[in-house]
Amino acid sequence: MFTRDEFEDLRIKSGEKMAKDEQLHQDALGILVRADRYYWIHQTNWLGEPILQLPQDMFALQEIIYKTRPRFIIEVGVAWGGSLLFYSTLMEILGGEKVIGIDIYIPDDLMDRINSKGRISDRIYWINNSSVADTTIEEVKKLVGDSRNNLVVLDSNHTHDHVLQELRLYSQIVGNGYYLVCGDTIIEHMPEKANRERPWGPGNNPKTALDEFLEENDRFVVDKRLNNKLLFTCNTMGYLKCIKDA
């Protein structure tokens, strides 16, 4: 039998070895590309509502939330809203003030469904606007006030220019020890126009924006320990930890 510390050490070292297994990661990517034809990434629900994320990425976010206990969680790109409910459920257990969901398209029936979950819905706040609009940024900053104990998850328009603008804007409200997550960096590694037509692809996606952001901003680093253990992930190298305040 292992002690808990010994088991943790085993997991960390095994993750480091797995991260170096290039063939394994190519195999995993191949499965993701093939499964994407069948909308595998869209098959997960939380409290009956779809989450457009892989379960392993949601568990990674759960680890971040448990470890850091953010005061505010800001999700840019809410899709069907299941992830907002997921974050709010964790806040119900762990504490926290608001989950802020931002999207350019939030139909009334979607808002009605997400707002029908009692206490889990009560802390969810909606902003129906572009994530990079001045009015949106002003509203977010007003909501979080002087808090930098915040988690930001970027998962909207995946073009390089848009994601880079989001990274620059939303990194300002993330403080030392907290996380900024850049979603769908996997696009850089997928075949061009693999399964669906999109205005982004290899060379123009969140990963290329992330690389440029990290070159110009020394406040954030990739959480490699977390990244090492995510074999199936859409957010490769996208989990950024803030290492110093602005």
Image: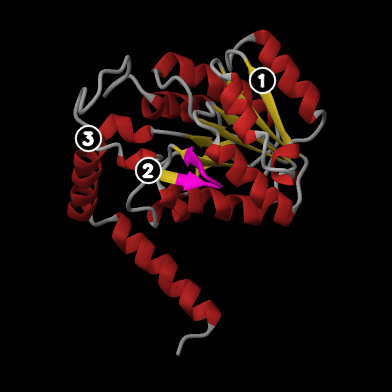
Residue bearing the label numbered 1: 127
Mark 3: amino acid: Arg
First in residue order: circle 1 vs circle 2? 2
> Magenta part of the protein: which range?
45-50
Quadrant of the image occupied by residue 193: top left
First in residue order: circle 3 vs circle 1? 3
Task: Say whether residue 236 is left or right of residue 107.
Answer: left
Disc 3 to disc 1, C-alpha distance? 31 Å
Q: Residues within 10 Å of mark 2 (few under 14, many from 20)?
A: few
- The verdict on residue 185 being magenta is no
Residue shown at the point (47%, 15%) measured from the top left: 162
Mark 1: amino acid: Ile
Residue 37's mark? Answer: 3
Quadrant of the image occupied by residue 185: top left
Disc 2 to disc 3, C-alpha distance? 12 Å
* Magenta segment, prevailing SS (helix, strand or loop): strand
| Quadrant location, the C terminus | top right
Q: Nearer the viewer, mark 1 or mark 2?
A: 2
Asked if labels 2 and 1 touch by Cβ distance under 8 angstroms, the answer is no
Task: Say whether residue 201 is left or right of residue 6.
Answer: left
Residue bearing the label numbered 2: 43
Asked if labels 1 and 3 touch by Cβ distance under 8 angstroms, the answer is no
